[in-house]
Image: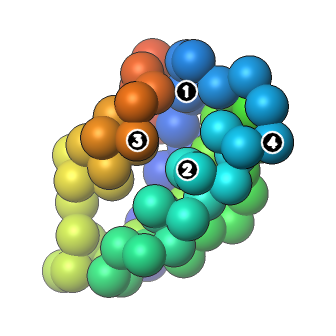
Amino acid sequence: MQQLAIEIGGMSCGHCVKAVNTALTAMDGVTVEQVAIGSATVAFDPARTSAAQITQVVEDEGYQVLATR
């Protein structure tokens, strides 16, 4: 498993946190460690998904991925 910390723009409330958490949780090979306003931390299996796919899911929810590490 690899770790990915994501800085997210456009999140402002609990609904935003829930939307991102739900989208990330639904991904195959992703374990959500923490989602808060402006950030998320996940562990993922690179054989099942990629960091690019994870950031795309966040963006598909309507938020901006500002940085990953």
Q: Amino acid at mark 4?
A: Gly
Measured Cα–Cα span from mark 1 to mark 2: 10 Å
Say which quarter of the image contains residue 31: bottom right
CB under 8 Å between discs 3 and 2 = yes
Q: Local crowd at mark 1 within 10 Å, few (<14), some, or many (≥20)?
A: many
In terms of sequence position, does the residue under pointer 1 or pointer 4 come before the other?
A: 1
Q: Secondary structure at mark 2?
A: helix
When the figure is inspected, residue 34 is found, relative to residue 63, above or below; the finding is: below
CB under 8 Å between discs 2 and 4 = no
When the figure is inspected, residue 56 is found, relative to residue 49, above or below; the finding is: above
Q: Secondary structure at mark 4?
A: helix
Q: Which residue is mark 1?
A: 8
Q: Residue at x 46, y 61 (%)?
A: 23
Q: Residue at x 19, y 80 (%)?
A: 47
Between tags 1 and 3, which lies in front?
3
Q: Which residue is mark 4?
A: 14
Q: Amino acid at mark 2?
A: Val
Q: Amino acid at mark 1?
A: Ile
Query: Residue 19, can we see it?
Result: yes
Residue 40: assigned label: none
Measured Cα–Cα span from mark 1 to mark 4: 14 Å
Q: Nearer the viewer, residue 35 or 14?
A: 14
CB under 8 Å between discs 1 and 2 = yes
In terms of sequence position, does the residue under pointer 1 or pointer 3 come before the other?
A: 1
Q: Which residue is mark 3?
A: 61
Q: Amino acid at mark 3?
A: Glu
Q: In this figure, which colouring scheme has been used for the structure? A: rainbow
